Image (tube, helix red, strand yellow):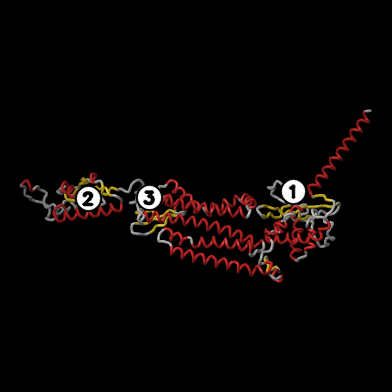
C-alpha cells in the first residue's frame, strides 16, 4: 500500500512540474512577441528581400522603400489588423506614404540607435540599466504632437503560428497617422515642387538645399527691416529713456520678430525634413528666449541710466547713501536677470526638444568627468561669479563708494559678474577681478558716511605763537565751503624737538576728495600768513659759536673755531 502511494505522489509531482514548465515556456513566449492568428491577409505576399526580423532592419527597410516610393512593399511593415482585409490593399500603401512623410518631417530617426537583435534585448555591460538582458516586444520610435495631443509611433514584434516573429508598426501607431499627416505633411510650397527636385542629396532633398538659403535670406531681410524701423522710432521718440531703450533693443527685437516670421513660414509655407526642422526649431527656441531676455536686460539698463542721471551724472560718494544702495541693487538685479535668462533658456530648450531623459542619463553617467572639467577649466570664472553674488548680498561696497584699494583712491563705477570697474581720481579705470578684489583688504570711506577728518602738519620754530595760528586756522577753515562741523576745528602742538615744534590742524570735510581740496587751500593760506607776517617762525639751523652762556656776561677764552656747529644742533623741519 505504501509503495503505491509513493508512486502516486511521484506521478502527481511530475505532472505538476510539467505544467509549471509549460506555463513558464508560455510566459516566456508572451514576453518575446505578440501571438496573432493572421497578419495583413489583404496584402500580397511580402517581397523576399524584405527583412523584418529586427527593429533596425524594419525601420531601415521602411524608410528605404518609401524613399523609392514603393509604398505597396512598405505596407508589409505595418500591422493593418484594424483594417478589414478588403481595405488593406488600398489603404495600406497610403498609410505607408503618410507615415513616411510624418517621420521624415516630424522627428529625425537614427536607425543605428535601434536594436539590431531580434529580441531587442538591452545590452548593458556596465549593468546600470535594470532592464538589461530582458527581451522586449514593444518599442517607441518617435513621439509627435498634433492638435494639442501627443501620439507615440511604436514597433511591436508579432508571430503567426510557427513563422518567424517580425517587427511591425503597431495598429495604435497607425490610427493617428492621418491627423499627424495634416500637421507634418507636405507644405504648400512642397506640393508645387517638381518631382525631380525631390531626390535625396546627402541628408536633405535637392529642393531643400535651394530653399534653406532662400528661407534664411528672407528672415534676414525681415530682421534688417525691423532694425531700421526700431532705429527710426528711436529718433522719433523724445530724448531720454524711451529713445535710449528703443535704440538698445534693435537687435533683440529683430531676432524675436525673425523667429516669429520663420515659425510662420515653417508652419504654413514651407516644411523641411526632420533634420533641418529639428535644427531650426532648437535654434528658433534659443533665439526667442535670448531675445526676450535681452529686452528685459536692456530695460534694466535703461533704469540704471535713468537713476545715474538722477544722481547728476558722476557716480561718487557725495550722493545720498540710499540712492547709491538703489543703484547697486539694480546692478545686482541686472546680474540676476542674466543668470535667470541663461538658466531659463537652457531649461526651456531642453524641455522643448525633450532631451531631459537622455541628457539627464548622460550627465549622471559622466558626472565625475564634468565635475573635474568644471573644477579645472571654470574655477576662475565660477569663483568670480560666486564672489559677485557675495558682494550683491553682503554689499561691502556699493556703486559710487570711495575705496582705497592697493593705495589708490577709487570710486566704484560698476560691479559685474566677473570684474569690478574702479575709477581713479585721475580718471583712469581699473578692471579688477571680483575674486581678487574680495581677497584683498580695502578701505571703504563711504560705508557709513562720506565725512572725513583731514589733518595739516606744519613744522615751525619754537617761538611760533600757537594761539595766533589757531585763530587764523579757524578763520581760514570756516571760509571753506567743504569744511563742515566748525565746532570740531582744532589745533595742537603734536611734536617738538630742540629747534622746532610740529603744529597739527584738524578739520572735518564733507567728503574725501573735497576734503583734500580744502586741506590744500587752508595749508596755502597758513603758509602765506606766516611768510608775510612772521617769517621768523620758520624753522632754521642753529649754529653754536661758543660754549659759554653770553647772556650771563661770560666771555669765551678757548672755544671752538668760529662757524663750528654744536654736535647736538641741527635743522628741524
Q: How far apart are marks 3 and 1 (CA)?
A: 67 Å
Q: Residue furthest top?
A: 1
| Residue tagged 3 | 323
Residue 568: in sight, yes or no?
Answer: no
* Contact between labelled residues 1 and 2, with CB atoms less than 8 Å apart: no
Q: Quadrant of residue 142?
A: bottom right
The mark nearer the N terminus, 2 or 1, is: 1
**Horizontal side, residue 352 vs residue 394: left or right:** right
Given this view, does label 2 or label 1 mark the residue nearer the observer? 2
Point out residue 108 in the picture as x, y percentages from the top left corner.
68, 59
Q: Residue 418, relative to residue 20: is it above or below? A: below
Point out residue 356 in the picture as x, y percentages from the top left corner.
62, 51
**Horizontal side, residue 419 vs residue 25: left or right:** left
Point out residue 44 in the picture as x, y percentages from the top left corner.
84, 61
The mark nearer the N terminus, 3 or 1, is: 1
Q: Residues within 10 Å of mark 3 (few under 14, many from 20)?
A: some
Residue 358: in sight, yes or no?
Answer: yes
Amino acid at each position: 500500500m505504501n509503495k503505491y502511494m509513493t508512486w502516486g505522489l511521484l506521478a502527481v509531482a511530475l505532472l505538476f512540474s510539467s505544467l509549471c514548465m509549460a506555463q513558464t515556456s508560455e510566459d516566456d513566449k508572451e514576453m518575446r512577441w505578440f501571438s496573432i492568428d493572421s497578419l495583413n491577409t489583404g496584402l500580397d505576399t511580402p517581397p523576399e528581400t524584405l527583412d523584418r526580423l529586427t527593429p533596425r532592419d524594419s525601420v531601415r527597410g521602411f524608410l528605404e522603400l518609401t524613399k523609392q516610393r514603393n509604398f505597396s512593399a512598405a505596407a508589409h511593415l505595418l500591422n493593418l489588423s484594424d483594417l478589414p482585409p478588403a481595405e488593406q490593399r488600398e489603404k495600406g500603401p497610403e498609410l505607408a506614404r503618410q507615415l513616411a512623410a510624418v517621420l521624415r518631417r516630424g522627428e529625425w530617426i537614427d536607425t543605428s540607435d535601434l536594436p539590431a537583435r531580434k529580441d531587442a534585448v538591452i545590452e548593458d555591460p556596465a549593468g546600470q540599466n535594470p532592464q538589461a538582458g530582458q527581451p522586449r516586444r514593444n518599442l517607441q520610435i518617435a513621439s509627435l504632437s498634433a492638435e494639442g495631443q501627443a501620439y507615440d509611433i511604436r514597433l511591436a514584434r508579432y508571430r503567426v503560428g510557427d513563422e518567424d516573429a517580425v517587427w511591425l508598426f503597431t495598429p495604435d501607431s497607425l490610427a493617428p497617422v492621418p491627423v499627424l499627416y495634416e500637421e507634418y505633411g507636405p507644405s504648400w510650397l512642397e506640393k508645387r515642387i517638381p518631382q525631380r527636385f525631390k531626390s535625396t542629396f546627402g541628408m536633405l532633398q535637392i529642393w531643400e538645399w535651394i530653399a534653406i538659403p532662400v528661407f534664411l535670406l528672407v528672415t534676414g531681410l525681415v530682421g534688417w527691416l525691423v532694425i531700421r524701423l526700431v532705429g527710426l522710432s528711436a529718433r522719433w521718440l523724445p530724448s531720454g529713456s524711451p529713445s535710449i531703450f528703443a535704440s538698445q533693443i534693435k537687435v533683440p527685437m529683430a531676432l524675436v520678430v525673425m523667429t516669429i516670421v520663420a515659425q510662420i513660414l515653417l508652419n504654413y509655407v514651407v516644411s523641411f525634413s526632420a533634420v533641418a526642422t529639428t535644427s531650426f526649431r532648437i535654434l528658433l527656441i534659443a533665439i526667442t528666449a535670448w531675445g526676450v531676455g535681452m529686452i528685459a536686460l536692456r530695460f534694466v539698463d535703461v533704469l540704471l541710466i535713468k537713476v545715474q542721471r538722477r544722481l547728476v551724472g558722476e557716480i561718487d560718494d557725495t550722493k545720498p547713501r540710499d540712492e547709491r544702495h538703489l543703484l547697486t541693487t539694480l546692478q545686482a538685479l541686472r546680474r540676476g536677470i542674466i543668470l535667470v535668462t541663461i538658466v531659463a533658456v537652457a531649461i526651456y530648450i531642453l524641455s522643448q526638444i525633450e532631451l531631459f531623459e537622455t541628457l539627464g542619463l548622460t550627465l549622471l553617467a559622466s558626472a565625475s568627468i564634468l565635475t573635474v572639467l568644471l573644477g579645472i577649466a571654470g574655477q576662475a570664472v565660477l569663483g568670480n561669479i560666486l564672489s559677485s553674488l557675495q558682494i550683491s548680498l553682503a554689499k561691502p561696497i556699493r556703486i559710487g563708494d570711495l575705496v582705497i584699494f592697493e593705495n589708490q583712491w577709487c570710486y566704484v563705477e560698476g560691479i559685474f559678474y566677473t570684474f569690478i570697474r574702479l575709477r581713479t581720481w585721475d580718471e583712469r579705470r581699473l578692471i579688477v577681478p571680483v575674486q581678487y578684489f574680495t581677497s584683498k583688504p580695502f578701505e571703504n570711506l563711504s560705508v557709513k558716511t562720506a565725512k572725513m577728518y583731514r589733518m595739516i602738519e606744519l613744522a615751525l620754530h619754537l617761538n611760533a605763537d600757537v594761539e595766533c595760528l589757531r585763530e587764523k586756522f579757524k578763520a581760514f577753515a570756516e571760509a571753506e565751503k567743504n569744511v563742515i562741523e566748525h565746532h570740531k576745528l582744532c589745533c595742537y602742538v603734536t611734536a617738538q624737538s630742540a629747534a622746532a615744534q610740529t603744529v597739527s590742524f584738524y578739520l572735518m570735510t564733507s567728503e574725501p576728495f573735497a576734503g583734500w581740496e580744502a586741506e590744500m587751500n587752508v595749508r596755502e593760506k597758513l603758509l602765506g600768513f606766516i611768510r608775510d607776517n612772521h617769517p621768523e617762525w620758520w624753522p632754521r639751523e642753529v649754529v653754536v659759536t661758543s660754549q659759554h652762556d653770553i647772556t650771563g656776561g661770560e666771555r669765551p677764552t678757548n672755544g671752538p673755531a668760529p662757524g663750528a656747529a654744536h654736535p647736538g644742533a641741527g635743522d628741524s623741519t
